[in-house]
Amino acid sequence: TKQKQRIRVLWFSRARLIEQPENRGPSPARNRGLAEARGEFAIFFDDDDEMFPDHIAALVDAALRSGLDVAYGQMINCFAHAAGGGRYVPDRVESHVALLDHADIQWAGSLATTALLFRRSLVAQIGPIDESLPNAEDYEFWLRLAEGREWARVPEVTSMYFIRTDGSNRSANGARNYFLAHQAIYAKHPTPRPLVRAGRLAMLELF
């Protein structure tokens, strides 16, 4: 098809690089990756995050040992400042201990995208990422992934999430879009739990 002709596919020994015909943001790219993937498990990896060498192996091992479809590991938040020339230098790191259940995800999805791995076949059950939600390309997906499902927890830190302190990251400069997206997600997934509702209000206030 013309669509396929416009997309250049580069082959590597263990990976394929698929270029979209235009930059439409993370959601379409991730959905395209899920559609093209052939492996049993899937994981998203943003360009400003870091996987430790045992990250994927630890998550896959946890999923296989538990028999569950989703696994997540602990991460470190690394705060970095601009050092010129497009470089960022770490200021400090903070541990981010996640012990997730559905209530946690209903509130704010308190884990980095890279920290979570899931069985790719789940996409056929719950549907792809909602591409209409600005700057919240995976949070609503995690909500659907958590519905009625237990997740395998890896207690060790296996990844790092970078936070730029100069306000140049999307979490800061896209606050309005995050507010609108979370507002829409909360309306789509109502909750009867008072603490979760309070947490959601606090999250909207933050944005």
Image (cartoon, rainbow, N blue to C red):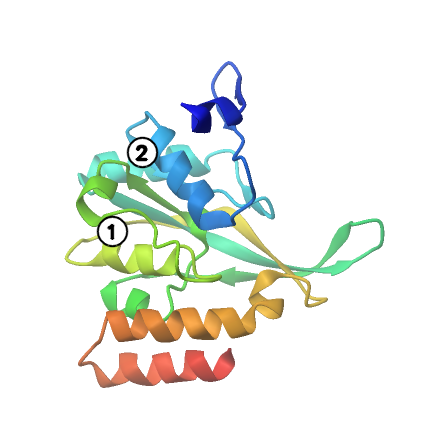
**Residue at figure coordinates x 28%, y 79% from the top left:** 196
Residue 62, position as x, y percentages in the image:
29, 40
Check the image and report above or below for 35 versus 202: above
- Say which residue label 2 marks: 41
Q: Which mark is residue 121?
A: none
Q: Residue furthest left?
A: 148
Q: Secondary structure at mark 2?
A: strand
C-alpha span from label 1 to label 2: 14 Å
Residue 149, position as x, y percentages in the image:
17, 53
**Which amino acid type corresponds to the residue marked 2 in the rendered image?**
Phe
Q: Residues within 10 Å of mark 1 (few under 14, many from 20)?
A: many
- Say which residue label 1 marks: 151
Name the residue nearer the viewer: 33 or 46: 33
Residue 32, position as x, y percentages in the image:
40, 37
Q: Does label 1 or label 2 sit earlier along the sequence?
A: 2
Q: Nearer the viewer, mark 1 or mark 2?
A: 2
Q: Residues within 10 Å of mark 2 (few under 14, many from 20)?
A: some
Quadrant assignment for the N terminus: top left
